[in-house]
Image (tube, rainbow, N blue to C red):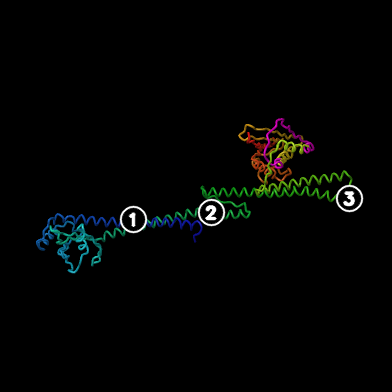
Amino acid sequence: MFKGITRRWICSTILVIFVIISLIVTSLIFSVNYLLKDDVEQTLIGVSGEISSVFENYKAENSTAFLANSRDYVENFQHKDSMEVMVINSTGRVVLSATGFSYEDNQSFEDFTLAQSSGDGYAFWEGTLSSGENVKSLTRVITNSDGSVVGGIRYIVSMTEINNQIYLLSAIFIGVGIIIMTLVVLSGLYFIRSIVSPVRDLSDTANKIAHGDFSTKIEKKYDDEIGDLCDAITDMAKDLEATEQMKNDFISRVSHELRTPLTAIKGWAETMQLSGKGKLDRRTFDKGMGVIIKESTRLTGLVEELLDFSRIQTGRMVLLNEKLDILAELDETVYMLKDRAVNENKHLLYDEPEAIYPPVYGDRNRLKQVFINIIDNALKYTPEDGVVAIEVKYNAEDETPNIQITVTDTGCGISAEDLPKVKEKFYKANQTVRGSGIGLAVADEIMQLHNGSLDIESGVGVGTTVTITVPVMIDNDK
């Protein structure tokens, strides 16, 4: 019936509360029992103390004198309405009582025997009379001037009313304890249910999300931690749905990117094969081989990009770091892409700094990969007659000295909505331009591995500026 959180709550909380309430109720019952009976005992002690003045310096010349003195005390006893008083002679036999009833000769009084041996001169007894009434008694012995016991006075109080009060208060305490326990259980079950039910809904929703159903919604019932968890799972489902869509778009783009060069390579290879060896003119042959080489290079680059992305995802990308001149790598990249810019009627501007910059410590090929990716993107998104400008600056005064390479284009730009996401995996802001959509993600990861950064600023219709920051190598010998 109960399982999970409910069972743990019952075992850990309810049982503890039950034990605590039981201990409190038991303590209260014992306290009331003790206080009420102690009050009776104190009353008996107070009343019995009166005989000290009656029998002070008493000398019992004979039993008749003792009996006469005791009769005066009994007849003038002021508490006859609340307790009974009886006189016991030295042999333990009742000789007088306030009620006037006689007692059996063979009846013994335990409290009289105990009082004789008690240092206080009195003793208590509690029990049930032959009539069935529960009573409490106190017997105080009377001694003469020689210290000999001449008799005793016994005071008896009915405990029926006291016991009824004890039973009533005990019943009240137990009832209150049961009510408190019931309220705790009911409120606890309500509270646990308010947690367990949403958690079960969250578990079911998470299970559906795990099986690919990202459209599942969670009803937010409480504005608390559970509600925050509902919002978090809802946001997670939206993010997963968006990521899944981006992944599907990525697969579609990659498939298209792979198909295009493969189709070109296959088409020209079939053309050459069908035409026969030596039957193609040199111009057509050179054109076909150029297409095959170009598309093979493009295909190789795409595969390498996918492999790099896989290494980053699995944490297997390893840098081959060395001391290098970053400007030399940038010069080589610009030189490599210069012809492409000319062929596309675009202006690639770069003035190599005259100053000598300090070296950096990094992976030569990976840094060049970042430069190629950023400049390639700038050329792709820049229209004809557009400008791609590259500027280098050395920040020697920064806390960590670094070299900044800024690539600015006059292309279409990136919207404010897409800008925060362009470095995410699978994301591609402009679907009309070729590319897999993982180049920037790979470049950003490479820069992070170099303890550097890759920052992007852009505006629609204004263009884009990408800033690559690489820390310089510090000479510790200085």
The residue identified by callout 2 is 199
Name the image quarter holding the C terminus.
Answer: top right
The disc at residue 477 is none
**Horizontal arrangement in the rendering, residue 301 relative to residue 82 (left or right):** right
Which region of the structure is painted magenta?
339-367
Q: Which residue carries the number 3 mark? A: 277
Amino acid marked by disc 3:
Lys
Q: Residues within 10 Å of mark 3 (few under 14, many from 20)?
A: few
- Horizontal side of 424 relative to 165 (left or right) equals right
- Sequence-wise, the earlier of marks 1 and 3 is 1
Residue 458 shows in the view: no
Q: Is residue 370 above or below residue 62?
A: above
Q: Is residue 217 visible?
A: yes
Question: In the structure shown, which secondary structural element does the residue marked by tag 2 occupy?
Answer: helix
Q: Are marks 1 and 3 in contact (CB under 8 Å)?
A: no
Callout 3: SS: loop
**Amino acid on which disc 2 is placed:** Val
- Look at the image and say whether residue 39 sits in the magenta stretch: no
Q: CA distance from mark 1 to mark 3?
A: 112 Å
Q: Quick one: SS at disc 1?
A: helix
| Residue topped by disc 1 | 28
Question: Looking at the image, which residue sits at the far top?
Answer: 354
